[in-house]
Image: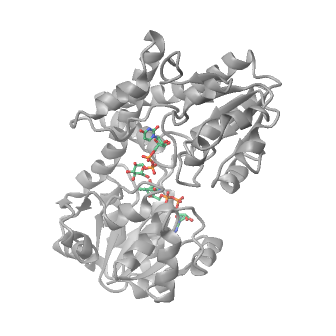
Amino acid sequence: MRTSVIGCGYLGAVHAACTAELGHDVIGLDVDPDLVDALTRGRAPLYEPGLDDLFRRNLAGRRLRFTTSYDEVAEFADVHFVCVGTPQRADSNAADLTYLDAAIDALGPRLTRPAVVIGKSTVPVGTAACAAARLQTLAPAGRDVELGWSPEFLREGFGVEDTLRPDRIVIGTDSPRVEEAMREVSAAQIEQKIPFLVTDLQTAELVKVAANAFLATKISFINAIAGMCEQVGANVHTAAEALGHDQRIGSQGLAPGLGYGGGCLPKDVRALIASSSETGAYQLAHLLQGVESVNEERRESVCRAARHLCGSVRGSRVAVWGAAFKAGTDDVRDSPALDVASRLVGEGAEVVVYDPQAMDNARKAHPDLVYAPSALDAVVGADVLLHLTGWPEFTEIDPGQLRTAIRHARLVDARGGLDVGAWQASGWEVAALGGKLTPGGRR
Ligand SMILES: NC(=O)C1=CN([C@@H]2O[C@H](COP(=O)(O)OP(=O)(O)OC[C@H]3O[C@@H](n4cnc5c(N)ncnc54)[C@H](O)[C@@H]3O)[C@@H](O)[C@H]2O)C=CC1
Ligand SMILES: O=C(O)[C@H]1O[C@H](OP(=O)(O)OP(=O)(O)OC[C@H]2O[C@@H](n3ccc(=O)[nH]c3=O)[C@H](O)[C@@H]2O)[C@H](O)[C@@H](O)[C@@H]1O
């Protein structure tokens, strides 16, 4: 099939490469010429395991190319996937739909022949119906241009795997033509018996925001339990493991610590709070306000732990391990690690950050922080070390060797991946979020 992908950021770049890998002809479009240039040269400007290989293969096989021209895209493709950003608005918690509106306004007037447009961006319920009406008004082909919505559920760091083998595919449409086009694009996945659900537009939009809200709720739930563990001397890691064995609960999304960040969960929870309040679904808004407030409290509790260990952080040197919003990505959007780092700078600390993949993005987003070239360099002369993103390389570092570099051997483990018993045995004073350390140091 001849498809286009409009908006080639974290979602669109992966979607374009994977759609080509599935055997379709793909043209990716972005308004950012530098991005298009990099993509054309096969350089995905994001860290996503497996993506470079897909780019190399499909660019060379000529199934994949990139452009900034809407004319080219409209002429080439029969199915257009819209993957532009829907960030939080600057003036409220609601989703900013200006990029989506701009994409529809640019594509619509160029659709002179029948086409299917499928939205993939995450949007508030009701957005797709408005976009469909607008598209038909703008398009010279009129009612021969139809729009459906197929929300995306991929996780950064697992983008390729999640796109090629998703847990499910959802398409919101009441048009047999849109459903057929989606079935054709997804033929390889349907053959693998991946569930393919057809629903109306509103339900498709809602499934996506509900999924992200549920994931956020699960994380805040275990973090609220962590807060309880801290009060009563219980151990949240053992509690989470025991809870996770219950198949109705499941072990994923129960890692306690610093809470959720990233380009999606935080803004999608806030947007759902805004739209549920607006539509009168007050119980949902109330529930999610609790989820958000627990998440916010986790960031503050890391700052409190640092203050507690140092007396005060003013004038202290703080080493931060991690800048990405989670391990496995270079994405620093709404990164809990950088948020904590900034809060401590605001309190008068000098903060030195190291991350294995996200240094360039972190420097751009937070030029106020100091950056070190390695995990070891970050701790030299520091008064406390904060472990804020759970990269595997941090678990492999010998705490005994680090002790000789740091000024005061103090650790806040906010991600729970370190063997804090070994750190204590090496003479470190440790504050671990979410419960007591047993005398042997085992959590
Ligand atoms: N990042 C992720 O893992 C996932 C993201 N999503 C959703 O996908 C959407 C996109 O998210 P990301 O890729 O993370 O955002 P992003 O910010 O990385 O990428 C958006 C891209 O759209 C481009 N763009 C903006 N206006 C445009 C226009 N008028 N025409 C063409 N291109 C335009 C931008 O230049 C940018 O490259 C959001 O709604 C997000 O919630 C959904 C699932 C996963
Ligand atoms: O809409 C989106 O963009 C995507 O948002 C999330 O994916 P992602 O943001 O890549 O990351 P997650 O792996 O869900 O992690 C989100 C945040 O929660 C934190 N987290 C995750 C799991 C956990 O157990 N504990 C925890 O604190 C992570 O460190 C991270 O900061 C969803 O998992 C995807 O299904 C969805 O498509």
Q: Is residue 337 left or right of residue 119?
A: right
Res. 414 in view: yes
The picture quadrant where one finds residue 1 is: bottom left
Is residue 290 in view from this perspective?
no
User: Is 116 above or below relative to 435?
Assistant: below
The image shows residue 131, relative to residue 95, as above or below, that is below
- The residue nearer to you, when weighing 179 against 351, is 351
Residue 75 at x, y percent in the picture: 42, 88
Q: Residue at x 73, y 19 (%)?
A: 310
Q: Position of residue 264 (x, y in %)?
A: 46, 48
Tally of marks: 0
Identify the image's colour scheme: rainbow, by chain, secondary structure or one colour.
one colour
Horizontal and vertical percent for residue 10? 51, 61
Q: Quadrant of residue 159?
A: bottom left
**Direction from residue 79 to residue 160 in the image, left or right:** right
- Nearest the viewer among 110 and 1 is 1
Relative depth, front residue between 281 and 191:
191
| Residue 125 drawn at (x, y percent) | 32, 49
